[in-house]
Image (cartoon, rainbow, N blue to C red):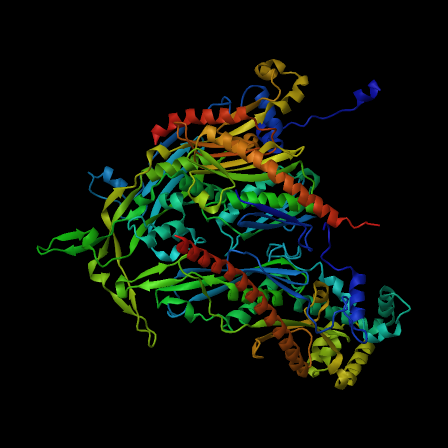
Amino acid sequence: MSAYTAKQNILQQVDGSATFQFSTTKIISSITGPIEVARPRNEKPTEAFLSISVRPSTGTPTTREAFLEVKLKKILSCMINMEQYPLSEIQIVVQILESGEREQFTCMELACAVNSLYLALLNAGISLKASFLSSFCASKDDNIIVRPTKEELDTSTANHLSVFSISDGKADELIYSDSIGKTTETELFSALAAISSDVNKINETVREVILQSVVDDYVWKF
Amino acid sequence: MSQNIENVQLKGVIFSPSELALVAPDITLTKYIKAGYRPSLRRFNEFKPMIISTAGISRYDISLLNDGKKINELTTVIGSSSIKCGGTSTICTISAGLVEDNFEAVNDYRMRLDADIIVNNDDKNEENEEIDNILGGNLINKNGCVYPVIEIAKGTTGPPGDEEIGLGEKLYETILHSGLINREELKVDVGLKSIDENGNEIILRGDDVGVIKKKFSFVIYARIQVFGKTGPLFDQCYASLVKALSDTKLPEVYLNERESNLRTKSGKRNANINIQSYDLVCDSVKYRKLKLRKDRICWSSTFGIVDLSSLNKEDNEGDIDIITETEEDIEQSILLTDLEGEAENNLSKRISVLSNGEGFFTSITIEKGNGSRITTDIIKQALELSQVRAKDMIPKF
Amino acid sequence: MPHIDNTLPIPNIITLHSLLSGNPPLRPSLRQLTEPRPLEISIASSTEYGHIEVKLGETYVSCKVSAQITSPYEDRPFEGTFAIGTEITPMCSPAFTSGVNADFSTAAPAIVPATAISVNNIDSNKEGQTSATAATNNINNNNNNNNNDNAVTMGGGAVMGLAADQAATEILLSRLIEKAVRRSNALDLESLCIIAGQKCWAVRADVRFLNYDGNLVDAASVAVITALLHYRKPDVEVIGSGEGSELVMYDEKQREMVPLSVLHIPICVTFQFFSTESVERNIKGENANSLVNNKNYIKENSDNDDDDLERMDIDNDAPRGSNEIIIVDATAEEELLSQGSMTVTLNSNKELCQISKSGGLNVDSVRILECCQIASDIVNKWTKEIKKVLAADIEKRRDLRAERVLSVVNDRSTE
């Protein structure tokens, strides 16, 4: 299992920012908003418009990054209180600093991006329906490896990524799940169980990170 | 007070069903489901019939018509399929390119195209094992892939939208990770075309072709065109891609002998370098079928989920008798198959399953969207239903 | 922090301007005019090579170098390729929206009143009043010649600093980095050739701008060159010759990785120019042609004013030269206010690799030489810093390697 670190409030110019790192995968995200919609045709009368851009660690964005954007949009639009920001835009940038996985996989980067975005959204003060965190696992010969390394991922038969909402410090609802590769029903459910217990673990650290940044940001000291 | 109420006249706004579906998809759907129907008048778990056929437009298809002799010289399409499902038609054409299996892409994990066609399982010397490691163990080395491009006919031209990119990328990911295509299948056994003593054309293969150290592989491209979109397209795109792939025939490839030793001198001063140039020729008639791994052929089913809890709030108004079967369980959700029309497309709570009908799945995507909690039951129900559907449909490929 | 406005409030601009045009000129941070902010270089990854993060004050830039094998350009069979990717995302500042028609237009109007303040006015209202009232006074008092100044100065700051529209900024920035690092032959392209005409290395440096607080160019140039110096590519070997030749690539465990051949260390230093006079007077001093141009701007004014101005300009012609204030390593605030900029690229041998001053405030040519002298000192300082960081990192990594070798030796001896 790979280690993870997180940090909030790194950048000054944007409303919220955070990094999240799963061993070799490192991502920095920034949130600006709610702001005026940059292009009038994107303006939605009843809810916020999410402009998400994912930037790869090397080279220019490809369809792979566009697909990540599509997935992130699905996850975020049901976690943000979109109705609260009608006619405005929430600008989201996800910069992959270290990819940490082969280009044929996306689960490490997606999980990392979801977690860093959660922290960045909190930092930006965007209204959320619930806390949420994500983790991933790989399965090989009926074994579930939670947060596998690059090499373990390469030799796995399937990989699973899930996002859970958090309530009372525990993984609660399944928000999003993506399994690719040859898998079975029992494997899916054991993977979901493994990921939800891993999310509980990540949550402990993440809470500390949030607490720390709240303490740091508290400027009205006497 | 009562007088006042009588004086107020509220004019009812009347929408036609199609308008209401556009304006308030959720209300439309609620109304239908409460009546026990879907907007398409199908039952909740009734699939749409799907007609799967080869499109008959690929290079080798004419042979069926013309005594198995003639081929369609005009096209480079090597596999095709056509699928009709309700009002939606999908046409998939497969084409291929040749790429040199080379070292150059080894650490180039940015360039999917090249990284994907490196095959080095032949020689079991140390360096090649090292390459295997660099390339990434089993999966990437064993599984071939397809690069699909989706075009949804909308009446306008322009760069592919989010949906098209998403579909294409998801198809790529699923085919690659499911292992539908064995990468060995894509390798090219390059022959050397020559003329023997008797003046007959012969094609040398294997050890006879000493000079060529380089190896080649096919890269498969798919172009999927969708007409008349009514709902989520992944199921149909996947079906058409698999059908087209099972129809795909790869041409025989050989080197033209005369040009195999061709050396070109670069035009620069002092640039006395020899650039090897091969003239690869695809045989215009001979071909082999692209074999797919039978057990990995799946059927994709996308389900939308309607939550009854949200419907029950409005139960007071009446119509309770119609949904009696669901009354006792407030949290129960209804699985809708083959979403169609504005009202159903609005459902963001979805499960998409690729099942092979024999207990295996190659892709499961669960999205909660704006719906209520996703239960284990509903996932199980979806998996089961997709199995039934897969058993039913896979033989039709 | 939530809801920081990327435009400067007008009082801030006025304060800044009054500070800069004081005697002696001061910067808001009390930094010396020719003193850059502290440069902080860090190696982002302890395992991988070529990933560098650079912080220049609050400006935060990271650069990642990668390499792959491709075939060379046909007309350059003996050279590898080198590309620099500089894409600005809204991450570094919301002012850079990811769209075509994104611009700093929200920021530009804020500049207008500020640059119109002349030194005389600030001096006359010295300490007694706040700068805000000073500004209003100044505008009221000097209506006759300040009105027309406004029209001219609007373009000055917005176009020449980085505060232009994003597309232009991005192009300008990537050209500068390209000229500074690539065209100055910092990376020896011939050493990237593997088999002439067939195989070569394609090196790519991706610069990510994470936080914007002015002076992206200098930070990016330091990041790129440091990343290039730090990067190691895997060792390759050509086995055999002619048609049967094969390329073998060795990974880190088999053979030590090879550094890129970097010939010299070019570093950009950007100067921002401010005029204590109005921009218009600066321009008008040059020749009669500019007078004609300027008439367009002051058309609406009475003839009286017009004459007044022209006369004044001619009068001011001779002593004008020393009116510009030149600062290095401007912050975002200072860049917004700047009326012109110049980027010089030097290496530690005091060789000038590139110089770029695209319009903006006219500056006395003699002062450019002074700038180069200042830049040279900064370059020396930064080069030392780069070398120090790299040396420390090599030391760190060598320890690991040495330990590994030693442990292998130990294993053998105990057997």
Q: Residue at x 67, y 18 (%)?
A: B317
Does residue B228 appear anywhere in the picture? no
A163 relative position to B50: left or right:
right
Could you say which is closer to the camera, residue B43 or residue C72?
A: C72
Compared with B68, C107 (above or below) is below
Compared with C401, A100 (above or below) is above
- The furthest residue to the right: C128
Compared with C44, C192 (above or below) is below
Could you say which is closer to the camera, residue B121 or residue B100?
A: B121
What number of labels is visible?
A: 0
Could you say which is closer to the camera, residue B127 or residue B262?
A: B127
- The furthest residue to the bottom: C318
Q: Position of residue C329 (x, y in %)?
A: 67, 69
Could you say which is closer to the camera, residue A52 or residue C201?
A: C201
- The furthest residue to the left: B198
Q: Residue at x 69, y 55 (%)?
A: A12
Q: Position of residue B150 (x, y in %)?
A: 44, 43
B330 relative position to C327: left or right:
left
Compared with A71, C101 (above or below) is below
- The furthest residue to the front: C414
Q: Quadrant of residue B321?
A: top right
Q: Position of residue C25 (x, y in %)?
A: 78, 74
Q: Quadrant of residue B259?
A: bottom left
Q: Quadrant of residue C241?
A: bottom left
Q: Position of residue B377 (x, y in %)?
A: 53, 23
Does residue C306 appear anywhere in the picture? yes
